[in-house]
Image (spheres, rainbow, N blue to C red):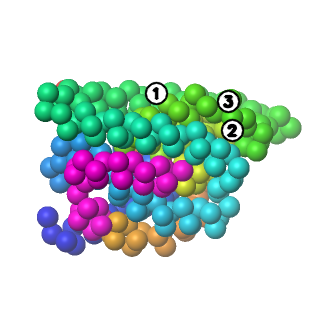
């Protein structure tokens, strides 16, 4: 594939990640599998590294815009990190065993679809709940009031899924933040990007130990993503929360269709 094409693909991916928080499962995995010919393990490993690199600049943009409430962000990060790291090492070890390799590939594909469908349910519940609140004097609980106990199980589950499959930000973490941390869509997008930047880095280290990561492809796509930063910042400032809700929902549905098609074929 030509370098210019790779840079343009990177720019498109970067725009989607910054404006919706969706990345690993929806965009990166299908692109790496269908356009770059990677198998599931290589795609997950490369997606984690690429997600970390791309989201560094995205995290900075959202931090400057005030979209990252630090207290709940650090709380759920502390919950998710152990599960993400252990899941990454577990999948890497199983994938290195010839007798388990094909089984790991199949389980990863199924787990991706299950995670995406579950996140769709959470996302729709949150959208319906917010739209049903007609009285402005009865708001959702502020993010700062969220407790460790309320986030522990969903946080650990999201961390495991992210570490094992690369499906994380917009598909798993974002609905968890909206449903259990009571965040609005822009705060949830910013926080999910910040959290998955760090978690994807830890997961990328685990996968690199197994030699599955395509560092060259990740760096080229990351360089291309930098081209979309000015447009992404403009969209985040001037477009409404409802717009971002529908865009994120669209990408979740597209991901379900693409990953289901891959599993069937």
Q: Which residues are magenta?
A: 195-221
The answer to whether the residue labelled 3 contacts the one labelled 2, judged by CB atoms less than 8 Å apart, is no
Q: Is residue 210 magenta?
A: yes
- State the image quarter where residue 26 is shown: top left
Q: Residue at x 15, y 69 (%)?
A: 2
Instruction: Looking at the image, tell me whether mark 1 or mark 3 is earlier in sequence order.
Output: 1
Instruction: Looking at the image, tell me whether mark 3 or mark 2 is earlier in sequence order.
Output: 3
The answer to whether the residue labelled 2 contacts the one labelled 1, judged by CB atoms less than 8 Å apart, is no
Instruction: Looking at the image, tell me whether mark 2 or mark 1 is earlier in sequence order.
Output: 1
The answer to whether the residue labelled 1 contacts the one labelled 3, judged by CB atoms less than 8 Å apart, is no
Rendered location of residue 228, percent (x, y): 42, 69
Near mark 2 (Cα within 10 A), the count class, few <14, some 14-19 or many ≥20, is many
- Residue 3 placement, left or right of 22: left
Task: Specify the label residue 182 is tagged with.
Answer: 2
Instruction: Say what secondary structure mark 1 lies in.
Output: helix
Q: Is residue 103 magenta?
A: no
Task: Specify the label residue 118 is tagged with.
Answer: 1
Near mark 3 (Cα within 10 A), the count class, few <14, some 14-19 or many ≥20, is few
Rendered location of residue 53, percent (x, y): 40, 62
The residue under label 3 is: 150
Residue 145 visible, this angle = yes
Separation (CA) of disc 1 from disc 3: 18 Å
Q: Residue at x 62, y 39 (%)?
A: 178
**Front disc: 3 or 2:** 3
- Residue 249 placement, left or right of 154: left
In what quadrant of the picture does the C terminus appear? top left
- Judged by its main secondary structure, the magenta piece is helix
**Residue toward you, 257 or 213:** 213
Q: Is residue 28 above or below residue 14?
A: above
Q: Residue at x 61, y 31 (%)?
A: 152
Separation (CA) of disc 3 from disc 2: 11 Å
């Amino acid at each position: 594939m030509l370098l210019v094409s790779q840079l343009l693909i990177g720019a498109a991916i970067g725009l989607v990640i910054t404006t919706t928080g969706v990345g690993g499962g929806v965009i990166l995995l299908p692109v790496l599998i269908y356009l770059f010919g990677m198998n599931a393990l290589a795609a997950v490993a490369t997606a984690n590294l690429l997600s970390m690199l791309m989201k560094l600049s995205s995290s900075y943009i959202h931090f400057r815009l005030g979209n990252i409430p630090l207290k709940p962000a650090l709380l759920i990060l502390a919950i998710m990190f152990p599960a993400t790291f252990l899941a990454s090492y577990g999948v890497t070890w199983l994938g290195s065993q010839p007798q388990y390799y094909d089984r790991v590939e199949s389980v990863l594909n199924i787990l991706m679809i299950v995670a995406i469908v579950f996140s769709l349910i959470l996302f729709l519940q949150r959208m319906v709940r917010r739209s049903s609140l007609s009285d402005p004097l009865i708001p959702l609980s502020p993010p700062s009031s969220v407790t460790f106990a309320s986030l522990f199980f969903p946080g650990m589950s999201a961390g495991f899924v992210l570490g094992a499959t690369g499906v994380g930000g917009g598909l798993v973490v974002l609905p968890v933040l909206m449903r259990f941390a009571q965040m609005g869509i822009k705060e949830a997008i910013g926080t999910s990007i910040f959290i998955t930047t760090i978690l994807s880095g830890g997961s990328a280290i685990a996968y690199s130990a197994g030699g599955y990561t395509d560092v060259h492809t990740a760096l080229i796509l990351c360089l291309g993503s930098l081209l979309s930063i000015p447009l992404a910042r403009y969209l985040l400032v001037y477009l409404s929360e409802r717009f971002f809700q529908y865009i994120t929902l669209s990408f979740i549905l597209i991901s379900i269709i693409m990953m289901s098609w891959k599993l069937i074929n």
